[in-house]
Image: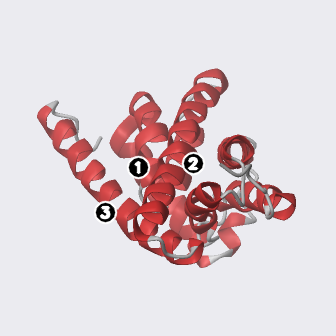
Amino acid sequence: MDAPTNEYGAWYYPLMLFLVAIDASIPPTPSELFVLGAGPLVASGSLLLVPAYLAAFLGCWLGDIALFYAFRLRLTHFLDRFTWGRWIHRNALRLTRKLGADATHVGLIGVRFLSGGRTAAVVASALGGVTVRPFIFYTGVGSAIWAAYMMTIGYFVGTTTGLPAWASAGIGMVVGTLIGVVFAMLLAFFRRLRGVGPR
């Protein structure tokens, strides 16, 4: 068996880390495509598993922490200059009212699998009064699971279809979104069973 060549690593790892980090504040950033695309590239030997995973995980975790502190320190005027920024701010406030500070711990792990959910959960945590240590822990767990989840989807799509990394990433986006929607439906169902409603 040939050793991995890691031919894209010099630029792919830092670029992926950067894109995943800024995606917390700028959700239109196509960071998911890079993380999903890392799976088939790892399978082909163009990237190494551990550095690729660490880049995705650290980008997610550090981006969450930076956005959390931006809202804790009231540095939100930049975000509110944009239509999507005001949308995030508005929906994060709504999420905070619905879930409360305690439930945002769950949101930091689960809601990030939905489009825009990561940003909303982080902002809701900052506005909902979640303290720093629990936030760092829960968002770290969520980031670790998210990075593994996305790369695994990309890896299996790439190895089973034999398609190029960009095509596998596109299919992985669809599959990942569908799984995220199912997860959100289950979360809403269990919240209703527990009688957790808007406050």
Q: Position of residue 109 (x, y in %)?
A: 46, 38
In the rendered image, which residue does mark 2 sit on?
A: 123
Query: Compared with residue 9, is residue 143 higher up or lower down, i.e. above or below?
Result: above
* Mark 1 and mark 3: Cα distance apart in space: 21 Å
Q: Residues within 10 Å of mark 1 (few under 14, many from 20)?
A: many
Does residue 46 appear anywhere in the picture?
A: yes
Q: Amino acid at mark 2?
A: Val
Left or right for 48, reference 33: right
* Mark 2 and mark 3: Cα distance apart in space: 24 Å
Going 40% across and 60% down the picture, which residue do you hit?
Answer: 176
Question: Which quadrant of the figure contains the C terminus?
Answer: top left
In the rendered image, which residue does mark 1 sit on?
A: 95
Q: Nearer the viewer, residue 104 or 154?
A: 154
Q: Amino acid at mark 3?
A: Leu
Q: Residues within 10 Å of mark 3 (few under 14, many from 20)?
A: some
How was this image coloured? secondary structure
In the rendered image, which residue does mark 3 sit on?
A: 178
* Mark 1 and mark 2: Cα distance apart in space: 9 Å
